[in-house]
Image: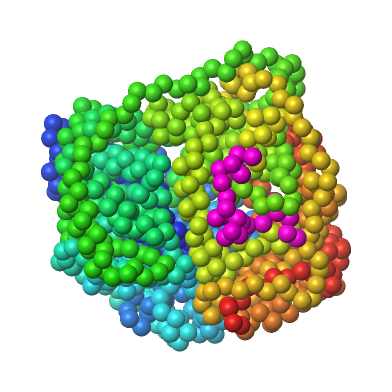
Amino acid sequence: MIRASRLTLLAAVGLSLAACSALPKLSLPSLPSLAGAGSNSAPAVPAGPTRASLKPGQWAHEVSDIAPDPRVRFGVLPSGMRYALMKNATPPQQAALRLWFDTGSLMEADDQQGLAHFLEHMAFNGSKNVPEGEMIKILERHGLAFGADTNASTGLDQTIYQLDLPKTDSATVDSSLMLLRETAGELTIAPEAVDRERGVVLSEERTRDSPGYRVAIKSMDFQMEGQLPPKRIPIGKTEVLKTAPAQRIRDYYEAYYRPERAVLVAVGDFDLDAMEAKIKARFGDWTAKGPAGKRPDLGKVAKRGQTVRLIVEPGAPLAVQLSWASTPDGLIETKAVDVRDTLRNLGFAVLNRRMQALSRAADPPFIAGGAFASDQYGAVRMTTLGATAQPGRWREALAALEQEQRRVLQFGVRQDELDREIASLRASLVAAASGEATQRSTALAAGIVGSLTDGETVTSPSQNLTAFDEIVKGLTADQVSAVLKAAFTGQGPLILIPTPSAIEGGEATVLAAYADSGKVAVQAPAGPGVTAWPYASFGSIGKVVEQKDISDLDAVFVRFENGVRLTVKPTKFRDDQVLIKARIANGLLDLPTTSQSPLWSGSAFIEGGLKQISAQDMERVLNGKIWNAGLGIEDDAFTLSGRTRPEDVATELQVLAAFAQEPGWRPEAFTRVKTYYGTIHDQLETTTGGVIGRELSGLLHKGDKRWTFPTRADIASASLDTLKAAVAGPLSSGQIEVVVVGDITVEKAIAAVAETFGALPARSGLTAPATAREVPFPDTSTTPVVLTHKGRADQAQLFMAWRTDDLFSDLQRSRDTSVLAQVMQLRLTDELREKQGATYSPSAGATHSVVFNDWGYLSVSVEVPPEKLDGVMASIRQIAADLRDKPVTEDELDRAKKPRIDQIEKSRVTNEYWLGNLSGAQADPRILDATRSVIAGLERVKAADVQRAARTFLGADRSWTVLVKPEGK
């Protein structure tokens, strides 16, 4: 089972949707497990068992000709509840538990719309053996953080409960299984608890509502005309959420939370026999209550010809989609299905590569585009071409999509295009197979759960690679072309244009434009030019002049003759993974404080390619290798980062060194970014989150232009020269530190860096002025800063901050303050969410700078209706006063510290953690001391220390507040 990213349909054309348990899941097509052999002709539509034919308690692989991953133990209880267990020691002594239900909002009655998701909330609000408010506390005492390790999600066709265990000792496992068993069949769903939770669910509905969200729902309604899914969005109807009696939630619970609809997945560092015995003992007595709920009638795919729909939604980006709808086959994954789907996905990969080239042209017809096909909840199979259009240029985007679709129908794909995509996908499969032994438990659990709704067989990376090689052996462009062309059949084309403003002439204008495009003759796609990689050598190999072991952290510091510093940490956390970061110059310290930073357009740097080769040609000549590049800016360094595998480390370092030495600065890449940002203010000002995200950083730094968001005028007047002036100098002359972490030896890392960064000419490495490390913080005031948004009248947000200090001014005090923030998080959740039902997700956190002097803050963020802002502010100030006036309880202190410590311990067995914590350590050894002592520092925090930190920083006159309100209120 090779699964593509579960991206949303509209995100692929630039309409981003916030992740939420109550959002519709519009998925890109997954490339399933691959088995079978290539043939000399395009495979016919396969026949075989369907998902609907599976019996209760039956696994898909039992009726498939594909063998499952032998590492997974599959089982079923007499009640029909299934379980899948897998022993995995990455990370050691941890586990991922998932309880999946074959039910979602599609199973709701008209007067239950939103109650499937509401029920998910009630799982945390009391059961037969766990009083209301205790479930989260039990988990926190075992080190699970609410949200990070304890979560749930509700979709249209599934509900998932998630526990990520920081330890697999008997107490933690037993408590976790007990709580999942309570969720499965013992929830109390008390009326008074339901009433308290209504405000929380309504807060989530407000928080998630945005232009992109509304476009997604309206798009579903257009594409699934007359079908059930658009009428069963998980968040439901507000009138139902406000008034539905607890009994209607219980009706849904008893009808659909049943053993035969449940699967428990457990992956981690535990004994399989012992875990299986625990599951049987804990869930063996679970029996269904009342009659089983029925499967819904999803409705038939409507018969439609060419149809247009305009969705006018202020704040949404302009986009264009062409879709064809057909009835899905509902087949379980078999070898024949995999052959068809693999060929189809390879065809779409070619088409997407062509569309990417169009978006990179000097005068592109759209900003970004993509093509894909997917089954939507078993109701419809949709093949779509979509693009984010430049403002006012929907005609060009529409014509480009129409003509590319027609081009592929007429001429198919070329063999060289197919071979390229085969090589690209195979490189990913090889890398996955090489890292098979160190796959993370959370990813493995997600893969098993992801297979459940689609009738897929769980297979290993090595199985996937073997099957893929069998399929593509002798594969021809004609075979792939035939399968790709067959995807564009069905009802349609359905032409959808989400737009922030009305189009003159409406749908008739769009139809005419589509007809005009169809009159333009299309030509066969041109073949690629032959291009060689021009950055394989950077001169004489650099010499090492100093090497130092940091033995307690298993790291090595190296300095080359040209001044380049290298930090290497070999690990075995992930086989075949190497992370690389080049830190250059001084980052934000190099930027002026009084002029707008141009780094908002920084993505144009990589998209601009290199001086001797474009980004498009780079991808072609380096095809089959695993590499990437990204430009970032940190407080004290510009960064060039990449992720690769051991055999491609040399290539990755060549790419990063080339960007440091000879970036391409192609204007068309900058134009694309500038065009996208041209309407960004329209999008951001429609939600509280958008406004706070745009304004907060600048306000927190009292207008220092290194942190402010560009104004409309800044964006309109921006040029590539502005970005180049800010970045080119530091990247070409600044000091360089390279950090390499992962599956590599010290010797190989030194050799690869010696041939790239170590071979560059010596650099001056100018030091940033001391004044650059002084950053202002807003003045404390009892009068909030008030911002406004143009969204819903019932949306508002509060952000309150208290200034603290930097990390190194008092390292232990910064740990005390971090624990104080965790305690505030617990109290905010208890008071504002559980007791008042005022908000969905209140948050608190602490920030301590490692670069800027005396700069840090403790903050609280809450979304509430505008009329509740004053009461929430009063509650927050009361919480702060209580923390000043009396020490926290030992239980509360433990629940604040333990999840934080366990999160760090989990992070310490990842390459990402060490890449971040070793960055800058050669220049500032205090970073190493902080890394060494972080867990011990948190463990030694006492109740008195938390109270002392509260008295020091949470004074009644020390706060600073921002409110985001609707316009006119």
Query: Is residue 726 or residue 57 the one in the foreground?
Result: 726
Left/right of residue 67 with respect to residue 238 in the rendered view? left
> x, y (%) of residue 802?
78, 65
**Residue at 54% from the left image edge and 80% from the top image edge:** 794
In this view, the residue in front, 562 or 553, is 562
- Residue under the image location 36 percent in, 64 percent down: 498
874 in relation to 747, above or below: below
- In magenta segment, residue 666: no
Which quadrant would the N terminus be assigned to in this image?
Answer: top left
Residue 507 x, y percent position in the rendering? 26, 68
**146 or 254, nearer to the observer:** 146
Quarter of the image with the C terminus in it: bottom right
Where is 57 relative to 586, above or below?
below
The answer to whether residue 820 is visible is no
- Residue in view at x 19 percent, y 31 percent: 476
Magenta residues? 702-725
The reply to whether residue 948 is in sight is yes
Q: Position of residue 97 (x, y in %)?
A: 49, 54
Q: Locate residue 416: give its quadrant.
A: top left
